[in-house]
Each structure stands twice: as structure tokens, then as C-alpha cells.
Image (cartoon, rainbow, N blue to C red):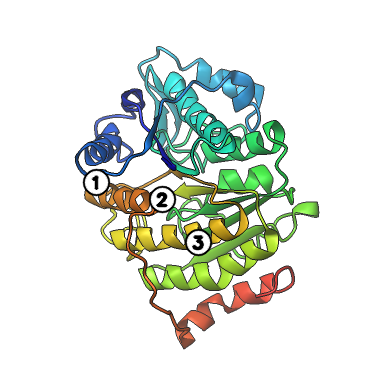
Amino acid sequence: MKTGIVKDKQYLQHNMGDYHVESPQRLEAVYQMIEDEIKFPYLFIKPRAAKEEEIGLIHTPSYVQKIKETSSRERVVLDPDTSTSAQSYRVALLAAGGILETVDKIMEGKIQNAFALIRPPGHHAEASRAMGFCLFNNVAIGAQYLLERYNQKRILIVDWDLHHGNGTQHSFEQSPNVLYFSTHQHPHYPGTGDSSEIGQNSGEGFTVNVPLSPGKTDEDYLYIYRNILSPISEQYQPDFILVSAGFDTFEQDPLGGMKVTSRGFGALTQELMDLSQKICGGKILAVLEGGYHLRGLREGVKEVLTHLGAQGPRTETSIQSSPQREKELSPFMETYRKYWNL
Ligand SMILES: [Zn+2]
């Protein structure tokens, strides 16, 4: 078995209200799909609760305390889009802990890659602030854990969620040890992620933002992965790849304006698989972020899992540049050619 899956019904116990798009029904749909449709053998990973000091790898003690104090309270509103229910703190510890448990399994060689199907999501969570449906920054905690617990030197975080992962960027923008690569609709929530945000001090050049106007297709994303992400990754030579896997770029997602199909998520996963085989022994941990169209989420997750499990068809289509692509990416290219051979 080379692929792990984190799933646990306790993740359904965080609830931000009956009409909130980041609903327990999202994971219910995904878990049902796994039961019905994932037929290849995989390792089921039972998450553990992260310890407070592990959350403290990224978050301030006073912020951890603030979220802890929401326990058993019916509802605490943290920002206009983000609130807690009685079980949210416990579930958020289990989300981050699911990542840490899976990092251990991959680093011990028990599996090669995995998909953590968790909630609440994480990439908007700042060191001392909840925002954008996120409480603790699961992916950032995982990356810092890899640096400290396993003495890794270079972690690549690929964020294909529709939105920019402001919290993840801010966690590592001063560090060359984590390269944050994000494609996102722009301008859009949360407002960060311009291609002029390149990292600071010794982290300069290790924050890579590809802001995109709406309407991008599978081919557009593949073009960016092949022509920007691949060469940068090959030059960076990461030890481990974390993926902030959101499905709100799906063509019918209620929060986004992109045109990615479920097969597109499979094709992007295949690109990352090929890359990871070349540079880090196939070590990939995908972590669920957004995705609010239930069928899109269900089908997208299925595609990602199928490719992680090496069961998916390969897309060999070559994708040509076009004047429109060149024009949109040219400010980006101009900035980043200073740091990377593109
Ligand atoms: Zn999102």
C-alpha cells in the first residue's frame, strides 16, 4: 500500500451553522464516495489530536488559548465568515494532528503519499487570527513539524485552492526552508497574493504567487505547473511536497470563477506525482482546504486519490503558449526570473 487516507467522522462535529458553505456535508459526501468508489488498497489513517505545543509551531500561545476557550460554547464568532461550535477546538486539534500522524507515516516509509480529508481547513489562519473558515493552519503546522521533528531542509507547499493562502505565506515569508507556491483568483478574497509578494529577507524569492483572472481552465493550470512550478521545484529540490488542495476552482463552485473540471484535479496531481518521483522519492501529502460544490468536491477528491494511488490515466497533451497566457504571466515572469531559471 503506498497511499494513505485520513478520515474520521469526528471532523463532522465542527459546525459553523446550518447555512454555512463550509459544512459537515462536504466531508460526508467525500467519505461516502470513498466507501462506494475507491477500490484500490490504501492505508486508513486514524488521526490523533495535535498537542498544544504542536499548534504552537505556528500559532501564538494566546491565540491557542482563545480557541481553546470556545470549547463547549454553542457559538463564538471569530470573524465575519468564521465561527466555532462546542466541539470545534477538539476537531481543529484533530485536523492538525491528522497531518502530523500522516507526516510520521510517510517519513517512516509506511506509505509514499496521502490525502488528509479533514476540516476545518487551514490556509487562511494567521499566527494569531482565525479567518476565512480556518482555525489552525494545518499545512503550515505540518511544514514546520517536518523542519523541526525530521530536520528537513526544504519543504515545497503547493496551494491550488481558489483563494490565496495568506496565513501560509505569512508563516514562511522570511524563510528559504519553505517555498510557498500559490495559484489563485485575483483580485479576490483575502486580497493578498500579488506577484510582487516574493518573500522577505532570507526568504526573498521563496514565496511564489501566480495571481490569475477568472475563467482559467485545466489547460491553463497545467501550463503553469509545467512551465513555472516544475522548473522552480527542480531547482529548489524539496525534501517533501505538501499540497493545499482546495476544490473551489471547480467550474461550478459557488465561491469561484474558475473553470477547472474534476479531471483537471487528476491531471494536476499527476504533474505533482511526476515531479515528486524525480525530486523527493514521491513524498506528497495533500490536505483538504476549500471546495463548496458537493459533486465537484466529491469528483475532484476521487481524481486526486486515483492519481495518488497510481490508478489514473495519464494526460500527455502538450500545452502550447498563447499570446493571452504570455501577456497575463509576463509581470510574474519578469519578477521571478531574478530568482529562478524560467
Ligand atoms: Zn478557497
Q: Looking at the image, do the residues carrying marks 1 and 2 touch, with CB atoms under 8 Å apart?
A: no
Q: Which residue does the image show at 44% across and 25% down from the upper left? A: 47
Q: Which residue does the image show at 46% across and 56% down from the upper left? A: 160
Residue tagged by mark 3? 274
What's the CA distance linking mark 3 and mark 1?
Answer: 28 Å
Rendered view: 56 above or below 113: above
Farthest residue, direction right: 201
Q: Residues within 10 Å of mark 1 (few under 14, many from 20)?
A: some
Q: Which of 168 and 306 is in front in this view?
A: 306
**Res 188 → quadrant:** bottom left
Query: How far across and how far down the image is residue 334, in percent?
Result: 66, 77
Rendered view: 320 above or below 298: below
Residue tagged by mark 1? 294
| Amino acid at dot 2 | Leu
Quadrant of the rendering where the C terminus is positioned? bottom right
Q: Nearer the viewer, residue 4 or 266?
A: 4
Rendered view: 103 above or below 158: above
N-terminal of the two: label 3 or label 1? 3
Query: How far across and how far down the image is residue 1, in percent?
Result: 41, 40
What's the CA distance linking mark 1 and mark 2?
Answer: 21 Å
N-terminal of the two: label 3 or label 2? 3
Asked whether, in this view, residue 284 is left or right of residue 23, the answer is: right
Which label was assigned to residue 308? 2
Q: Can residue 217 be seen in this view?
A: no
Q: Which residue does the image show at 57% across and 70% down from the upper left? A: 228
